[in-house]
Amino acid sequence: MAWIVEQWDKMGQFYASLEKGHATASTALKRLVGFSEKNHFYRANRELGRIFKTENILEYMSDPLLRKNRRRGLLKGEQIHQLARDLAYGKRGKVSAKDIQEQKNTCSCMTLILANIIYWQAKEIKRVIEKFSHEIDPFCLTMLPHISPIAWDNVLLYGEYILDKKLIR
């Protein structure tokens, strides 16, 4: 704590300049990384980070709901990654383009396809609920938050796609 108390005013100025937009995050990070272990400002920030990390770990360990929500978020992220791997199966998910612009183009196309699949799935879930809401048991509707549009079992991933340019607006 002594390191933090000693550098508290400088740390306040440092983080306030980030908050107000007077310094960018990249500039601030370069500044922190540029310091050595012997620098008091660096050590104070490191110790403050350790306190926040410890607090977060203790909160995580003591709160089952927090653990459940974080796990759910991680699983959704993994679902998206699995969908991306399944979409890019031809090259085993590797971007083989050498030019940075081609790499960006490949990644943008993948993101667009992922977004389209998730959007279409969400629309389908909504359509089914609206169409059959009068037949659905109210108990089933309480399960709705647990249904994820990040699924692709009903999507033909590896087929021939023919786009009719007349239908594109």
Image (cartoon, rainbow, N blue to C red):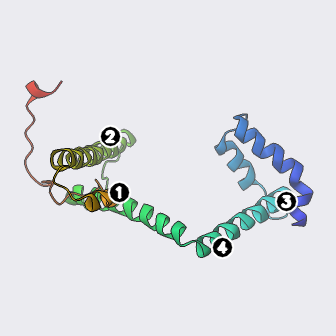
Q: Quadrant of residue 23?
A: top right
Give the vertical position of 111 relative to 38 (above or below): above
- Please identify, in this view, whether the residue under mark 4 or under mark 2 is nearer the observer: 4
Query: Residue shown at 64%/69% (left/top)?
Result: 59
Residue, disc 2: 105
Q: Amino acid at mark 4?
A: Leu
At mark 2, the secondary structure is: helix
Residue, disc 1: 145
Residue, disc 4: 58
Query: Residue shown at 72%/62% (left/top)?
Result: 49
Which mark is first along the chain, 3 or 2? 3
Which mark is first along the chain, 1 or 3? 3
Q: CA distance from mark 4 to mark 1?
A: 28 Å
Instruction: Give the side of residue 121 with respect to residue 158, left or right.
Output: right
Query: Residue shown at 19%/56% (left/top)?
Result: 136
Q: Amino acid at mark 2?
A: Asn
Which mark is first along the chain, 3 or 4? 3
Q: Residue 115, percent across and down?
A: 30, 45
Q: CA distance from mark 2 to mark 3?
A: 43 Å
> Badge 3: how crowded within 10 Å, few (<14), some, or many (20+)?
few
Residue, disc 3: 39
Which mark is first along the chain, 1 or 4? 4
- Please identify, in this view, whether the residue under mark 4 or under mark 3 is nearer the observer: 4
Q: Is residue 76 visible?
A: yes
Task: Name the one closer to the observer, 34 or 128.
Answer: 128
Q: Residue 81, percent across and down?
A: 34, 59
- Please identify, in this view, whether the residue under mark 3 or under mark 1 is nearer the observer: 1
Q: Amino acid at mark 3?
A: Asn
Q: Residue 36, percent across and down?
A: 79, 60
Q: Residue 16, percent across and down?
A: 77, 41
Disc marking residue 116:
none
